[in-house]
Image: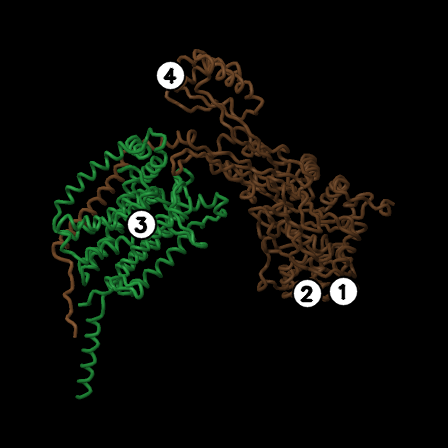
Amino acid sequence: MARAVTERAKRARRQEKLRSHNYYDYSLLILVMFIVAFGLVMIYSSSSYTAQTAAKYNNDAAYFLKRQAACAVIGIVAMLAISKINYRLLLKRLPIIRITAATFMYIVACLLQIIVLFVGVDLNGAKRWLKIGPLQLQPSEITKVAVIIFTAYVIYLAPKMMDTYRGYVKVMIFMVIPIALVGKENMSTAIVLFLITTGICFVASRKKMFYVVAFISGTVLGGLYLILGDAFRMQRIDIWLNVETHPYGYQILQGLYAIASGGLFGTGLGESMQKLGFIPESYNDMIFSIVCEELGLCGAIIVVLLFILLLWRIFTIAINAPDLYGSLLCVGVLAHIAVQVIINIAVVTNSIPSTGIPLPFISYGGTSVVILLAEMGMVLSVSNQIKGY
Amino acid sequence: MRRKRPVKKFSLKMKKTLIAVMFAVVVIFIGLLFRVFYIIETDSDKYTKKVLSQQTYVSSNLLYKRGEIRDRNGTVMAISVKVYDLVISPKTLLEDEDNREFSIQTLVSCFGIDRTELEQVINSKPDSQYYVIADKKGMTSDEISSFEEAREAAKEAARKDDSLPVVVGAWLEERYARQYPLGATACNVIGFVDGEQGNNGIEEYYNSELTGSYGREYGYFDAELNLQRTIMPAVDGDNIVSTIDANVQRIVEKQINKLMTDMGAENIAVMIMDPNNGEILAMASDTQYDLNNPRNLSSMFTESEIEKMSDSEKATAYNELWRTFSISHTYEPGSTFKPFIVAAALDEATTNPNTTYTCNGKMQVGEYEIGCANRIVHGAVTPKTILTESCNLGVMQVAAGLGRKQFYRYMNIYGFGNRTGIDLNREEKGIIHPESELNTVEIATSSFGQTQNVTMVQMLSAFCSLINGGKYYAPHVVKEIINEQNAVVKSVEGELVKQTITEHTSSLIRDYLKETVKSGTAVPAQVPGYDIGGKTGTAEKHGADQEGNYIVSFIGFAPTDNPQIAIYVLIDQPAVDDQAHSTYATQFASKILKKVLPFLGVYGDKKSTE
């Protein structure tokens, strides 16, 4: 009899333990892994020809695959590690310097952007790379995380303030520094940073009218800037409108050929014709066109569906997060991925003027994939703080 | 205890906004998918045309040259030559009235095309933009030079004066054509090419080495949107040096064809090999075809027969025509097999040079009575006289002494029942008795080369090891692979596969076979001035309607003290009344050796001229 009682007590304790056990979003984890793996397959498919035929890539068909896979492994380890650290540590003051970790990240990102302007590696005429020993990294990618963390932090400190336009102005006063620093060398990433910040503010604010007004006036101003601004940007508009006849529409036009030739089911994995030298650096920003060519409209639908599922998981975590800061972090990551996917696919399909934004997780780019995975780690960390039911 | 501050929460209003944002994102995603669908729907037709135009405009394929095949002395046996096809665009010619007359005039005068025929073509295909003139395919650079000059001159003149006409709607396309300067010589070894795929021979087996890769010229735009032109040069295929000696091959083929007309036979085939490294110097049969025209069946059928043939019948006929007899025909070898058994028994010491056996002309084996050839009674025989007199009963007793296990082991050592791995496709394995079925009768019949099937290449490769000190070299037809810079990519040295018998046994066999040609059954194989060794074979053919049909053969080597070449001659069903005489083969071998030996730098020995 006494024995049965202790058994029951034990079971109750075990159930209690299970109930209080923190939640962890495994479906998000698996989804991310799957997208990264899919990206590796597509990078191998689209880059092997280029790599094989160029001596500077050692004529090694797997040159790009190996490098991306190495970065993906680093990223996944980072993601798993970060997901087990409580994200609230970002709000804690660091020892000695007495500032919060979020502010520290912001300062570091700004400093890196300044450093890259002076000692950056010149690639294609823009200083975007920082070389540390054998490592090469793009500080603008680090800035993306810093902006998410710091914007969410500023709003978290005074959420009420966001209900007037002052809140947005206050956030932008902080953000204008990194955005301008990035924008000097890389306009498209600056646009992404701006949209992330604005996205977080928009969600946090109760008054939406201001954003509508700002959006309209911004569009008008932007249009004026493009028309009156330098010829280089005006040319992009010209290419966009006359992609078939403009001599510089080459890359986009070749991408459109790839999409059109893919049809509903595509030419089959590895069978792309356009990657054979027609689409320059097809494993980069233009990778979606190769996906369309090889896997067809069905492949495109699956890729978009994967991103919708991914955003849906992040959305669910944002809604259920234990506090405002966790929610805002998730909103920032959500905005980051959504903005990049939209801009990338819109450029590839010539829906907007061309600008170089990679497709998250799938395009070739080491820093990008490591940072994105780190962000996913952050979201997982938020999910880990949700109390089980 | 400190009061806990209330946790700031994600408010309901924020949640609603986020739902709206999420909804908007999904809507945009779906919109983009519709955009992709729209591109596929509207542009897929246009795409085909664009791709064709970009082949010539932005990017073009650069041709590679397929590697050459040369014989061991550098004689070119297969080569790719650049040729030109004349292409016209009737549509352009009809539309461009200013230049039409001049263009047609230039074509007529430079190529000697009939004017009315050309105009007929243009008018009958008004919408065509690509029409290859059938008569003007595969022209050499000499044949096109006058047209190229006329076109350039007109272009130059028009640059100065706009009113002058230029050539439009006609151009030349270059490609490589495969040519075989030696025609049918060594056709089975060389093979031919269909498109880019080798068919038969070296062309097929070494296709990937001979094939190069296309180059590409394309333009792309860099970050500053400057057009960059990149040329990835074409890589020519590697050249291949064969072990074949074209002169020897030609002599052998000539002799085969001569014997075919003088006497006739079902098949005649000859192989010559270097016993010291497995290099095949000549390999020929009576089935020959012109490599420049491999689909010409006129050697086998009449014109009207060919017209009536279905595609599958033609395919069968082609396979027959292209077949490499020496590696894909299997047959019972006959007495040329005896040296292998004697060598094995000597090696295993189940016999020795002084052992004597008795031959009474016939012998009871199991339920069968087996007789010596022509019921000759050889009396007392030793391993040596077994070979010189070709005594069946003697070799049966030697084989019986060897026993089932050793017999089967040696079949494997010699490589019978297995492919030799020669660098040619479609090699056959032959059929030998499995160890479990090697009973007294099978051992007896196998010992003189009946009831088991072999290929010529198996026989000659194993025979080389019998006479060269026991070293089995992998037979091969390719000596070296050389790249376009003339550097050796791969050199095929004699690959020593295994030791079949001992040096000592080999020297005994050499001695026995020398005696066979000197005073035994192979006397007609003698060549004045040379020491030749060898063994004859007269094999009964089995099967329906094969009564009285024989394969006569001779397998030999020269010189006897230091073998430089090994030869195998095979005549399948000589067209004579009484086929069972190895003389046809031995005489034939003698004729070939007489012509071939000096060519191969094997010189006679004064002693034997006496």
Please give the residue where the numbered disc 2 appears in the rendered image.
B402
Please give the residue where the numbered disc 4 appears in the rendered image.
B95
Label 1 or label 2, whichever comes before in sequence order: 1
Q: Give me the disc on residue A163.
A: none
- A148 vs B254: above or below: below
**How far is mark 1 from mark 2, CA to CA?**
12 Å
Q: Nearer the viewer, mark 3 or mark 2?
A: 3
**Chain letter behind tag 2:** B
User: Which color is chain A depicted in?
Assistant: green
User: Which color is chain B depicted in?
Assistant: brown
Judged left or right of residue B123, residue A54 is: right
**Chain letter behind tag 1:** B
Q: Residues within 10 Å of mark 1 (few under 14, many from 20)?
A: some
Work out whether residue B388 or residue A384 is closer to the camera in this orientation and state it: A384
The kind of residue on which mark 2 rests is Leu
- What x and y, as percent, mark residue B493? 66, 50
Please give the residue where the numbered disc 3 appears in the rendered image.
A360
The kind of residue on which mark 3 rests is Pro
The colour scheme applied to this rendered structure is by chain
Judged left or right of residue B530, residue A300 is: left
- What x and y, as percent, mark residue B67? 58, 38
Do marks 1 and 4 both belong to one polypeptide chain? yes
Please give the residue where the numbered disc 1 appears in the rendered image.
B352
- What x and y, as percent, mark residue A302? 28, 49
Do marks 1 and 2 both belong to one polypeptide chain? yes
Classify residue B345 by image quadrant: bottom right
Q: Nearer the viewer, mark 1 or mark 4?
A: 4
Work out whether residue B115 or residue B492 is closer to the camera in this orientation and state it: B492
